[in-house]
Image (spheres, grey):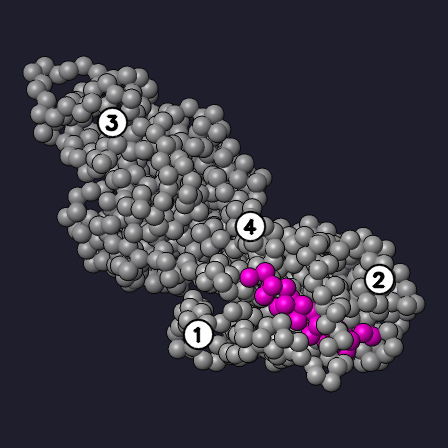
Amino acid sequence: MKIHIKNGRLIDPQIGIDAKRDLFIAAGKVISIGNTPDGFAAKQVIDATGLIVCPGLVDLSARLREPGFEYKATLESELKAAVAGGITSLACPPDTEPVLDEPGLVEMLKHRARQLNLTHVYPLGALTRQLQGKHLTEMCELSEAGCVGFSQADIPIADTQVLWRALQYAATFGFTIWLRPEEVYLARGGVAHDGEVAARLGLNGIPSTAETLAIATILRLAKETGTKVHLCRLSTAEGVDMVRLAKKQGLAISCDIAATHLHLTEHDIGFFDAHCHLKPPLRTQRDMAALRAGLQDGTINAVCSDHTPVDDDSKLLPFAESEAGATGLELLLPLTLKWAQENKVDLSTAIERVTSAPAKILGIDAGHLAVGSDADVCMFDPDRYWQVEAKSLISQGKNTPFLGLELAGKVRHTLLQGHTVYLAP
Amino acid sequence: MVNPQLTKDGKLKHLLSIEGLPRAILDQILDTAESFVGVAEREVKKVPLLRGKTVCNIFFENSTRTRTTFEIAAKRLSADVLNLNVGTSSQAKGETILDTVNNLTAMHADMFVVRHSASGAAHFIARHAAPHIHVINAGDGRHAHPTQGLLDVFTVRRYKPQMHNLRVALVGDVLHSRVARSEIHALTILGVPEVRVIAPKTLLPEHVEKLGVQVYHDMRAGLKDVDVIMMLRLQNERMQGALLPSAQEYFKTYGLTQEKLALAKPDAIVMHPGPMNRGVEIDSSVADGNQSVILPQVTYGIAVRMAVMAILAGNS
């Protein structure tokens, strides 16, 4: 179908456009930017006056809860939430039930996602069987089945010999390894940053050293083995410094943070607010400032939703007993825009952090609207405020520390390969 | 941030933690407790303040002593008392905390006395309980044990009424102690100018100084010229991990002996929330010595708990 998106402000960081340009789409592909192609007769004209038109967002971490946790969320509910958040590509971690450690499971997930045809789903395979940190998975088979990388989700490998071998094996075939840096023993039993708030509330702490020690180990092993490593969900100022230095020394690493951590600190736990029970834990003001600065100067490549829908029963418990995680697909864009506005970051840079930058980490051709590419498009109103409420969220997960808050940035229209997958009511 | 234990007009609705309570409320509790101390000495040990009310002791974690003192306190106020050891019944059957709380609410209880092993459990229950119910925290994880903190400052006030002129030392496992946190808040709110904590680094939380205390690792230096010594209980399981090498070494470095007690002021008092580990954190000769006020603490505990219940019931 031929589509003409007119009067929008087109922002595409990868091809370097931030201007009022029309977009022309045919057969699911972008065929022209700015100039009407000869003989182009649009079947659908989308008036994007007052809207920003940008590549569909690419989210590096969204738990879709399928298979195994359908009572928390289903593929359908979460992919609908994704497109309502302007996300057209997403990576999902392997901590499902069963764990994504067999090609058949990956194929099934890809197949189910394709049938729904809402968002491109890129599974991350388990790095070790059952995520137990002992035996390697069949990475080549999993890669053929559609895994774009291998991860331990939130279960770090304690045995450094296994980690070393896993990285060596992955390096043999050029696979990217995704690791959330956390030293198992230092983090054991912890539920909050080991600081002032945990001391006051009597919560078990996770020290910042749990992160920095793990980063040091991973960076050293990545250097020794020459493996491409992606560090997930940084939370500490020192961690950002270590990554900055490693990149300066030429190591092939990238990293991301969760959008929640751009805006919250340990103090937001208040009187045991279980919505602020997150992994990694919310840390200090100083850490938050360093994450915001790191995202701005590019040390942190991308920001992701770290979408983790949790059912009410698992959150309605005392803080330490509640399940960690927050819903995030529909908040990724507004929370990124909020950061950009507060840190005086231009829109193009902000959009890069949720489109072309994460696409590069995934190694996929997405996150841009160059002529000939898939017409995965997000159109949003940057000035439109909306209130985060259980009923305003499409995701089955209603658990977020931002409940009740007003955020700017509302997605109006999302296209996947040229067909409408979301249209705001 | 709104303090969840106060009503809109600033009265005590629940007692969840000492932290953030205004001094006036602490004074009110302590003054009321003073008037209840005499009740135990009467022939009829009852006052009718809670007649017709049902107090429910919900203990998700076992504790005979604390539960008993709450039970006595409630009965002296003429309340009906319901004891529930949830640890051994409902939870084992998979019932959630909220289910338990809702069931007890349906039985028309008026007040919950709650103990739970998770920090924040009392806050959680207070947030989700029906609006007419008062919640008293009888200990939640490592977070708070406010009636213990109150009875401790009540004891201090009785022996050392000049609170604005005191030096108080807490000795031992502050990291795992809900009692220590409540004592520290109570002492600082009542204007004690110097509160010290004495412990090895493994038994102190990160940034403990932000609670307004001075940190000592050398017990002898820390006890110098103090008026009050509050010993903390050291649980046996702390010896099994990497926190401490042995009970013997702990007693040598942080146990209270006559010799170390002599470093404090000559009229210093010694306190302990119980149950004591004699020969681990405290020497028997100190625990039973003439500077010890450990048994009066227990007696005052009933008066303080009566005061808390009476004030909460009066704020309905």
Q: Nearer the N terminus, badge 4 or badge 1? A: 4
Q: Is residue A101 magenta?
A: no
Name the spot of residue A136 as percent of width and height, x first.
35, 59
The CA distance from mark 4 to mark 1 is: 27 Å
Q: Which residue is mark 4?
A: B8
Q: Are marks 3 and 2 on the same chain?
A: no
Q: Is residue B314 left or right of residue A20?
A: right
Q: Is residue B312 magenta?
A: yes
Q: Are marks 1 and 3 on the same chain?
A: no
Q: Chain of mark 3?
A: A
Q: Secondary structure at mark 4?
A: loop
Q: Are marks 4 and 3 on the same chain?
A: no
Q: Which residue is mark 1?
A: B107
The CA distance from mark 3 to mark 2 is: 76 Å
Q: Using the rendered view, name the quadrant where residue B225 is placed.
A: bottom right
Relative depth, front residue between A240 and A193? A193
Q: Which residue is mark 2?
A: B161
Q: Using the rendered view, name the quadrant where residue B175 is placed.
A: bottom right
Name which residue type carries label 2: Pro
Name the spot of residue A268 as percent of width and height, x first.
52, 46
Q: Chain of mark 2?
A: B
In the image, the segment drawn in magenta is: B292-316
Name the spot of residue B23 as percent of width and height, x first.
71, 54
The CA distance from mark 1 to mark 3 is: 64 Å
Relative depth, front residue between A89 and B71? B71
Looking at the image, do the residues carrying marks 1 and 2 touch, with CB atoms under 8 Å apart?
no
Which of label 1 and label 3 is nearer to you? 1
Name which residue type carries label 3: Leu
Q: Nearer the N terminus, badge 2 or badge 4? A: 4
Q: Secondary structure at mark 1?
A: loop
Relative depth, front residue between B125 and A369? B125
